[in-house]
Amino acid sequence: MDDEYCVKLSDDTGKLLLSYALDIGAEMLVNGAEISRVEDSISRICKAYGAKEINVFSIPYVILVTIYCENEGYITQSRRIESFKYDLYKLEYLNSLSRNICRIKPDIKSIKDDIKSINKLNGASFVRTFIGYGMISAAFTIFFGGSTAEAVSACIIGFMMHAYETVLKKLKMNKFLSSCVCAGAAGILAVLFVKFNIGESAENISIGNIMVLIPGLMITNSFRDLFSGNIISGFVRFTESVLLSIAVALGMSIGKLIL
């Protein structure tokens, strides 16, 4: 980038710039962005404000960035990603913010207000996700050959799964164990619905509920990371998605064996 388009960083703004760029990158990663998009956004934001050397290293749980500024020398900061929530609505706003920052180059301190505004946005509400769990469960049950009664059963179990998952998140349970518990509860309920003659096959009911728990976005992003050359990140995400899928299958099997 030509010098005429670069904002010269003062003694303090370099650290602020890097901190806000990392905040944006971390939020993008938390809400479902692939690694290459996160690294590119951080690099472009820092470059827009005159950082000379920019080195970004990111894996799904850590972002590490070092930049060089004429007045401050090398600055290094990192962010630890504790959990993911996959909110594509927020991700769209974060992408727009990063593009606007690169194009307009606003005052660095004003970026913090923009980040706060995006963080205050409400994603899918409890009611929406509650209804979504039920509708998706019913739709997949019908898609895989289930009857209307089995779809209704899957829908009700989907509602209950969302309630279980919400409670387990508040208890901060490990996500592998949480997926296993939710799947186990769904398996038990599917067998009970069949015993009460609401549907003929527990398998047809369960397949709809399983699809809700499968980490589809994580699997997709793992392949996108692999194809873009981020081998470590892609492998980590793929391994995690496989382990989550195994936890779901194990929980469902245990649930059915109990009854």
Image: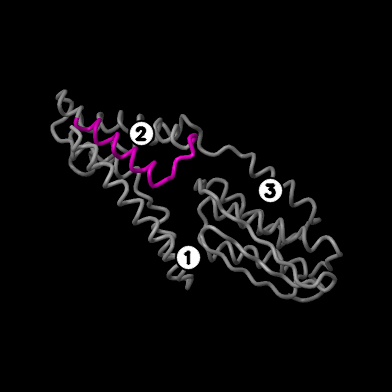
- In the image, is 193 to the left or to the right of 74? left
Q: Residue at x 40, y 58 (%)?
A: 220
Quadrant location of the N terminus in the rendered image = bottom right
Instruction: Identify the main secondary structure in magenta.
Output: helix
Mark 1: secondary structure: helix
Which amino acid type corresponds to the residue marked 2 in the rendered image? Met
Q: Residue at x 54, y 39 (%)?
A: 123
Mark 3 or 2 closer to N-term? 3
Q: Label 1 to label 3, Cα distance in Å?
A: 25 Å
Q: Residue at x 65, y 63 (%)?
A: 42
Q: Label 1 to label 2, Cα distance in Å?
A: 30 Å
- In the image, is 37 to the left or to the right of 245? right
Which amino acid type corresponds to the residue marked 1 in the rendered image? Ser
Residue at which label 3 appears: 115
Is the residue 212 above or below the residue 223 in the image?
A: above
**For discs 1 and 3, the disc positioned in front in the rendered view:** 1
Residue at which label 1 appears: 233
Which amino acid type corresponds to the residue marked 3 in the rendered image? Ile
Mark 2: secondary structure: helix
Q: Nearer the viewer, residue 132 or 243?
A: 243
Is the residue 8 above or below the residue 191 in the image?
A: below
Verify whether residue 42 appears in magenta: no
Could you say which quadrant of the image residue 196 lies in?
top left
Q: Nearer the viewer, residue 18 or 155?
A: 18
Residue at which label 2 appears: 161
Q: Residue at x 38, y 43 (%)?
A: 177
Task: Name the image colouring.
Answer: one colour
Instruction: Rate crowding at label 1 as few (under 14), some (14 to 19) or many (20 or more) other CA atoms within 10 Å.
Output: many
Look at the image and give the residue range highlighted in magenta: 170-191
**For discs 3 and 2, the disc positioned in front in the rendered view:** 2
Mark 1 or 3 closer to N-term? 3
Q: Are marks 3 and 2 in contact (CB under 8 Å)?
A: no
